Image (tube, rainbow, N blue to C red):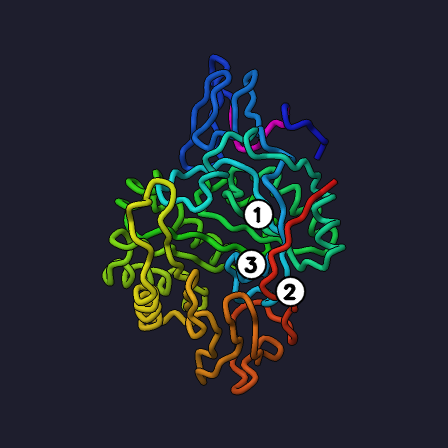
Amino acid sequence: MAAQSRENFVGRFWKKLENNKVACQLCPRFCILGENQRGFCFVRENVGGELILTTYGRSSGFCIDPIEKKPLNHFYPGTGILSFGTAGCNLGCKFCQNWDLSKSAESDRLTEKVTPKQIAQYAKQTGCKSVAFTYNDPVVFAEYAIAVADACHAAGVLTVAVTAGYIAPEARKEFFGCMDAANVDLKAFTDRFYREIASGTLKPVLDTLVYLKQKTKVWLEITTLIIPGENDSDNELAQMTEWIVENLGNDVPLHFTAFHPDFKMRNVPATPTGTLKRARDIAISKGIRYVYTGNIHDQEGQSTYCHACKKMLIERNWYELGEYHINNGRCAYCGVVCSGHFENTPGGWGSKRQPVYFQ
């Protein structure tokens, strides 16, 4: 890929229309942009009849996190992951926990200018097993993420997308074609929620989940932020988990995480611990083998258990690992496979969160 400045980096996934307009084909919004107009995501702009990615090569900051923070519990537990994001988002969630990044003009927050090769080399030098595209949704900076992923793979570093999965089919194939793992945020299981709370639609997300599971080798985990009164009913949770088992199988880890009041939903109470445990119980009753709770202290709900003999395989206390009983990807007690990517000895990164500054 030829180097381009951020001011003139021509993106992929668009087509030229009459009257110098362009049609973005990255996500299901399919924004049509006149001269100098930006899409819903705010970071893709029509400049001179070309679609420009204004955030290419620029970041809101870098940090080495525990892999469990993404959250990924079945993808090399205990390892450190170099994480970064840019700005912008193609959804409009009223509860956004990173609204200062996803809703900012890119010039407000983006300070780091780092090449894909620099990112890959730093991850390699610091012993990070992988690099995560996170904080804001990497779909909106797909070209940069793809270039970084290519550099990472050349250096022997894995790549992880933390995404809402709101992406069009053509872009989906190329974007996930360079990812080793993904955590997809399934925000709810109703069109009403996606339309009124997230400014999107449900079906493209479900399509992404099915694509990842059935058409790729990307390791997949799912997260649902449970919001009181919005997506926490027994009926919705049952329908969602039944759909997961039927369409994705029973071995895709599912994370239920606690909401805290933020952005445009400050009047909604935080998620009670009991609600997350109820959601976990429902998912397990529907046959999902690995169900976790997050954003609360719940050692039982954060640990991994063998689905056959029920013994604890990985003990977790927040992001700290304790007991570890997996040998060659199998339960050390009964020998049944534990789905995921595991080494016989877990990583030792722990719960540290280490900011990174490129000079």
Cα–Cα span, label 2 and label 3:
26 Å
Residue designated by label 1: 133
Would you place residue 186 above or below residue 273 in this image? above
Q: Is residue 9 magenta?
A: yes
Residue at 48% from the left image edge and 48% from the top image edge = 163
Front of the two marks 1 and 3: 1
Q: Is residue 279 magenta?
A: no
Measuring from the top left, give residue 189's x and y in whole percent. 31, 53
Q: Element at badge 3?
A: loop
Measuring from the top left, give residue 94's x and y in whole percent. 35, 41
Measuring from the top left, give residue 117's x and y in whole percent. 73, 43
Residue at 31% from the left image edge and 62% from the top image edge = 272
Q: Earlier in the sequence, mark 1 or mark 3?
A: 1
Residue designated by label 2: 349
Residue at 30% from the left image edge and 40% from the top image edge = 195
Q: Amino acid at mark 2?
A: Trp
Q: Magenta residues? A: 8-15
Q: Element at badge 2?
A: loop
Q: Earlier in the sequence, mark 2 or mark 1?
A: 1
Would you place residue 276 above or below residue 137 in this image? below
Cα–Cα span, label 2 and label 1:
19 Å
Q: Considering depth in this image, is 242 or 303 the residue closer to the camera? A: 303
Residue designated by label 3: 217
The residue lying furthest to the bottom in this view is: 333
Q: Residues within 10 Å of mark 2 (few under 14, many from 20)?
A: many
